[in-house]
Image (cartoon, rainbow, N blue to C red):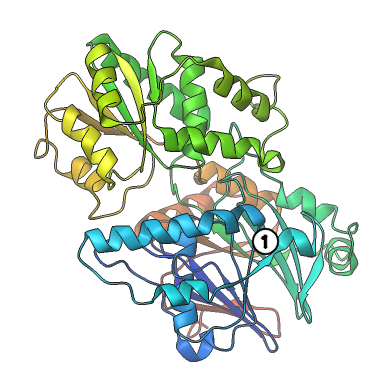
Amino acid sequence: MTKLTIWGGAGEHGRSSYLLSGRRFRLLLDCGVKRGGAGEYPLIVPEQAQRLDAVLLSHAHEDHSVALPLLYAQGYSGEVWATRETRAQLDTYFRSWRSSVGREGHELPYTEDDEQAIRYRCLEEESGSLNWFEAISGVWMMWGRSGHLAGSVWFLIAAEGRSIFYSGDFTAESRLLQADSPAEALEAAGGGTHPQPGRALRLQGRPLDLAIVDAAYGMDQDTQGGKLKQLEQAIRRTAARGGKVLLPVPAGGRGQEMILWACECFADLPIVVEPKLVDGMRQLTASPFWLRDRDQQAARSALGSITRFLASGGWASPHSDTERERLLAGSGPSLWFVPDGMLQSALSRWYYARWAGHSTHSVLITGHVSAGTFGYRLLHEPGQHGVCEVLKLRYKVHQGRKDVQRMLQSLPVRHAVLVHAARPETDLLCEALIRDGGLHGCTLHSMAPGEELVLENRQELHLPGEG
């Protein structure tokens, strides 16, 4: 019997944490937090945490990683499997979370000693991408790039006659980052260092037993091209009325992609980029494995695009408030990229204070903002914090309706749990995918924290209590 227990992340955006357990193994997939007040943490059961064999970490973002110290505080003493790139990013995310919780006047449910207790195991040191290897006795695993963030991965797991896919956060539409196709990897799984599980899965022609799939954008069907067109139109409208555009973005991933896009699309507008985002660009040049060989929009490599940007000098990067004030005073319509997509940091608030009194200016929020954050308040309390325009227009870094459909049709899989979005949105998505058809033999599941799915020995997956 193999069981999936939701400790967080299904039916909500945040605290991704999925427990897989069988007769002789227990794996945890991610262990993140959900923003809001003191934060919401996974439903960790200490006695189960103490019995875990390993933790597989898909990437460093806080909603997948920052509850790891709590897991150790609850008694876990094993290893966390992650890529080198993810490991290098984690300390920054831990510090950021401590700072965020402290600003709100709350305390962490763990100590810095618990952070230091984390034992990391590097995926690349065990096996290269798209090769099977035995992670623990009887549990075989494969990882591939997920296109979401440098270092982000998906996992294929084979144990006790069951096969499980975990997408992590996934997009095939990144302009910079490479995403490996899990379907192609599975088809070719007879190769590699340890071919036995892959060959069995491929030659028997059986589908995967279970997939845990990123469906963060729910019913949204837009392509990345459609999203960029909406963003371009919004920026052009602001520029036409003489205003400045503030773009708060994460320090890594989406931020660098949007900066390169803006430099190509708005050669007529001054662009200001905060140093932390430029540092993120430089870090990508040191991690070419995660980058696309070819930019989706042009016959050039993603690394080449970054290198040209860094050498171009067609942008400004202020290093002090004095420089920022000088640039603000000397520029008309322009684009301003600042780290922190939720506008929680002191720097992003500094910028917003200078935008708030100008109805010609705009703020474009391009990703998720958690309840209680300043970005969330700006969107849901229009007019209470200033007169500038505040819009939310997504830049795609997750999967929507058509993306989920393509992924599930390509694998294929017997049962799929759709995660990373609120339960009502996930319910709607499940209903729509069923109406669309094409998911032959696949049962969709919309779940919530605390719920379980059980894969019985008779190879039927069901919710406990169902007939």
Q: Position of residue 440 (x, y in %)?
A: 67, 56
**Residue 212 falls left or right of residue 44:** right
For disc 1, the marked residue is: 155
Give residue 337's quadrant in the image.
Answer: top left
- Above or below, 56 relative to 361: below
Q: Is residue 78 left or right of residue 191?
A: left
Q: How many neighbours does mark 1 have within 10 angstroms: few (below 14), some (14-19), or many (20 or more)?
A: many
User: Horizontal placement of 44 versus 440: left or right?
Assistant: left
Residue 349: x and y in percent read: 22, 40
Closer to the camera in the image, 410 or 397:
397
Quarter the N terminus occupies: bottom right
What amino acid is found at the position of numbered circle 1 in the picture? Phe
Residue appearing at x 89%, y 69% in the figure: 196
Q: Quadrant of residue 450?
A: bottom left
The vertical placement of 39 against 26, above or below, is above
Judged from the image, the secondary structure of the residue bearing numbered disc 1 is strand
Give the percent coordinates (x, y) of residue 120: 63, 69
The correct choice, above or below, for 182 with respect to 353 in the image is below
Q: In which quarter of the image is residue 158?
A: bottom right
User: Looking at the image, which is closer to me, 219 or 94?
Assistant: 94
Residue at image position (14%, 43%) is: 381
**Residue 8 place in picture, x, y as percent:** 43, 70
Q: Between residues 415 and 346, which one lies in front from this camera angle? A: 346
Q: Can residue 395 be seen in this view?
A: no
Relative to 101, residue 273 above or below:
above
Q: Residue at coordinates 61% horizontally, 76% vertically from top-left?
A: 461
Q: In the image, is 305 to the left or to the right of 187? A: left
